[in-house]
């Protein structure tokens, strides 16, 4: 009995240091299961497959943390702050959940920087998944860049919030930014903005300079320069609200670095210095400019539009300043004049309607609808009636007299001979 007591006592004494380390270390900032770490960097170095790093306190970093493996991070009601570029994801996957904020204290790049692979065959090389309770704050929320102008295998799934602010020099922010040197269309970055996401920016809600593919769900995106600024790539919009509150401006032609403000909800710059190949597909949503046009396409550099295709199937497009909903360059208008098949507009979009579509004005909005068979038949009947009315009895008499005169003229000799007889 005494031996058992001694054994239990030693066992209890042996457990105490482990218990203290696991639950009472005042220097612990994060944990993985029952293991506690004093730094986030140490936890990232030690996290195993399928494990989750959970914050138990706010974390302040001195430098950027590299993510080059699968890391699951639960903010757990806490914040992570670094001077700039809190995380750089390159050759890894970062899954962020839980409520909290990841932010730059000296905004310059972004809360999360992503670099893709230089190998065009690398799929899902750098992946970032951001949960609905996560907030990213910095010059950008997500900054997608490159090594030697290559950035293959980037995939982003974003459900959270972004607050893009001015950088330390006063440059306006960009909610999600894709560097313009990314030009390859094969295995290009894919950014999925999920339903419920919210992005606000002092500059552009999204600045799509480099070639990338955006799939935008029922989210909210707002900027003071433009809601979305596009120079390259494919943008698919399904139910999003895109707004711009900034002043009405005419972008400077030939502007190469960045994108000038226009005040439009969607601003498209055709610029030969970028990948171009712009495809815009709007299936539904709300698009609003406070002071300018809703969609503004212009030539920044070069002589031709870089819009390959545009399609508007539905949505509400309004300019509070009563500006034309769509303003575009002459090259654009020559190539794209039949891309609207639905939606409501605060100015008449008839110049861009597809064949067999029409507009009706109701409550100061032009609604686009497909012409009904009744309207088509009515037009056909009108044309038929015009043809039928042409062939009246009087018409036949006149035609008969004209034919008779013609015959008499060409056979006047025979007719004269008849009278001589």
Image (cartoon, rainbow, N blue to C red):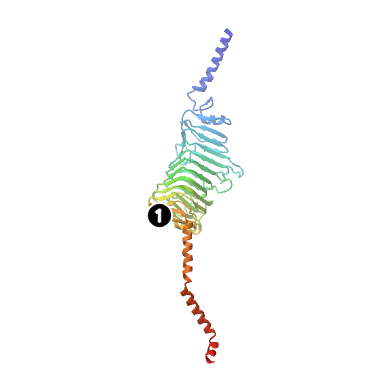
x, y percentage for residue 233? 53, 49
Foreground pick, 309 / 397: 397
Foreground pick, 261 / 265: 265
Q: Tell me the quadrant of the picture where the C terminus can be found.
A: bottom right
Q: What element carries label 1?
A: strand
x, y percentage for residue 144? 52, 43
Asked if residue 195 shows in the view, the reply is yes
249 vs 82: above or below: below
x, y percentage for residue 328? 46, 56
Q: Mark 1 points at which residue?
A: 361
**Residue 408 shown left or right of residue 243 in the figure:** right
Q: Which residue is drawn at 52% across and 20% down?
A: 19
Foreground pick, 254 / 244: 244
Asked if residue 330 shows in the view, the reply is no
- Which residue is situated farthest in the right direction here? 121
Counting every numbered tag in the picture gives: 1
- Which residue is situated farthest in the bottom direction here? 420
Label 1 crowd bin: few (<14), some (14–19), many (20+), radius 10 Å: some
Q: Residue at x 56, y 15 (%)?
A: 11
99 vs 266: above or below: above
242 vs 387: above or below: above
47 vs 155: above or below: above
x, y percentage for residue 110? 48, 40
């Amino acid at each position: 009995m005494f031996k058992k007591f001694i054994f239990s006592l030693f066992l209890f004494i042996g457990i105490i240091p482990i218990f203290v380390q696991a639950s009472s270390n005042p220097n612990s900032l994060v944990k993985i299961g029952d293991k506690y770490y004093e730094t986030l960097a140490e936890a990232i170095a030690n996290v195993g497959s399928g494990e989750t790093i959970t914050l138990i306190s706010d974390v302040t970093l001195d430098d950027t943390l590299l993510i080059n493996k699968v890391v699951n991070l639960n903010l757990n009601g806490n914040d992570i702050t670094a001077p700039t570029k809190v995380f750089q994801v390159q050759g890894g996957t970062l899954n962020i959940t839980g409520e909290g904020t990841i932010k730059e204290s000296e905004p310059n790049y972004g809360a999360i920087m992503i670099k893709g692979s230089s190998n065009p065959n690398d799929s899902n090389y750098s992946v970032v998944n951001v949960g609905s309770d996560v907030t990213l704050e910095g010059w950008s929320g997500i900054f997608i860049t490159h090594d030697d102008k290559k950035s293959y295998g980037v995939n982003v799934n974003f459900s959270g919030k972004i607050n893009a602010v001015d950088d330390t020099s006063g440059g306006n922010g960009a909610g999600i930014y894709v560097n313009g040197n990314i030009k390859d269309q094969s295995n290009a970055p894919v950014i999925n903005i999920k339903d419920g996401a919210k992005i606000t920016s002092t500059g552009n809600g999204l600045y799509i300079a480099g070639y990338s593919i955006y799939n935008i769900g029922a989210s909210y995106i707002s900027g003071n320069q433009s809601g979305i600024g596009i120079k390259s790539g494919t943008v698919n919009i399904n139910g999003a609200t895109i707004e711009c509150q900034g002043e009405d401006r005419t972008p400077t032609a030939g502007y190469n670095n960045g994108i000038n403000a226009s005040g439009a909800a969607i601003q498209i710059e055709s610029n030969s210095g970028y990948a171009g190949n712009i495809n815009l597909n709007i299936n539904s949503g709300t698009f609003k400019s406070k002071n300018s046009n809703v969609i503004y396409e212009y030539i920044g550099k070069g002589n031709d539009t870089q819009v390959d295709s545009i399609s508007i199937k539905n949505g509400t497009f309004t300019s509070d300043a009563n500006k034309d909903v769509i303003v575009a360059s002459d090259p654009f208008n020559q190539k794209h004049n039949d891309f609207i098949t639905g939606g409501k507009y605060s100015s008449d979009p008839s110049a861009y309607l597809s064949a067999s579509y029409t507009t009706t004005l109701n409550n100061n909005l032009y609604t686009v609808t497909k012409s009904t068979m009744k309207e088509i038949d009515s037009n056909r009947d009108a044309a038929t009636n015009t043809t039928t009315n042409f062939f009246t009895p009087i018409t036949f008499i006149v035609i008969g007299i004209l034919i008779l005169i013609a015959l008499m003229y060409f056979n006047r000799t025979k007719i004269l001979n008849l009278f001589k007889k």
